[in-house]
Image: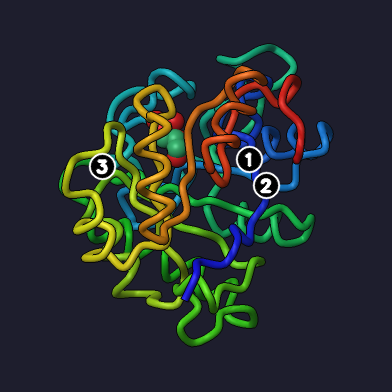
Amino acid sequence: MPTPPWPFPRVLAHRGGGTLAPENTIEAIEVGRAHGYRAVEFDATLAADGVAVLLHDDTLDRTTSGQGAVAARMSAELAALDAGAWHSPRFAGARVPRLDAVIRHCRTHGVWMNIELKPAPGAATLTGRVVAECTAHLFADAIVAGGDRAERINPAVPLFSSFERAAVDGARAAAPDIPRGYLLDTVPSNWQEELQALGCVALHTNHLHLTRALAQAIKEAGYWLFCYTVNDPARAEELLGWGVDAFCTDRIDLLFLV
Ligand code: G3P
Ligand code: MG
């Protein structure tokens, strides 16, 4: 059976609102919405008490008022940090949001999500499982049996992705009907085997390492192809011309919906 067309939005705001707002915050998603974006990529990880929150790094130092390992802090401690002032004064007071709050916010506003599973070292399986359980709970009304297969996807349901195989596997075990993508910075020669083993519908990759021939091979094999992080309109056009289905961008002020 031929692969159905990519069922989701084609242009996603990277980490919530790209570089225009503090990454992985509700405020960023709101900036994205103000720019017309209705699709978002963000990073989910676990606090010490097992609550899923949005943060990119293993440590707090770059994007919050805290210091040290994220995984060593309880979710209540993370909630008390400032996650906006590092970006610019107008975002001072933005919080590290919990994943459940973000999913609720996105659903309320019709924003589709690519949820990247971003585990701390050693926590990949658990992170995949917890994020998937949280997502499955909040999308219980929309998830269909076999919905992780391209032809059965409900386009309202998020797409998971991760660089960590164990995180993808953990998500699959906890919520098998939510679709999955596998993130690969550089695509290895055994990519097809890997995607098949993980039951993924999409390959997510760094556009800087992608070639037209590789894009064609991925599409011909029946997988969707997603690129990060595309910030130049001419490059976006080129990639779409190669058959790339979708991408995320930091420049939500330059790249618009197609
Ligand atoms: O999911 C695509 C992209 O977000 C991967 O890189 O480091 O920004 O999470 P990173
Ligand atoms: Mg990410």
Residue 100: give x, y in percent of width and height. 56, 59
Residue 40: give x, y in percent of width and height. 62, 44
Q: Is residue 49 above or below residue 256?
A: below
Residues under labels 3 and 1: Cα distance?
24 Å
Check disc 3 and give the amino acid type: Ala
**Disc sitting over residue 12 in the figure:** 1
* Numbered disc 1: secondary structure: strand
Mark 2 vs ligand 1: CB under 8 Å? Answer: no
The residue singled out by tag 3 in the image is 120
| Mark 3 or 1: the one toward you | 1
Residues under labels 3 and 2: Cα distance?
25 Å
Q: Is residue 93 above or below residue 107?
A: above
Residue 213: give x, y in percent of width and height. 37, 36
Question: Do callouts 1 and 2 mark residues in contact (Cβ within 8 Å)?
Answer: yes
Residue 67 in sight in this render: yes
User: Residue at image x 59%, y 29%?
Assistant: 249
Check disc 1 and give the amino acid type: Leu
The residue singled out by tag 2 in the image is 39
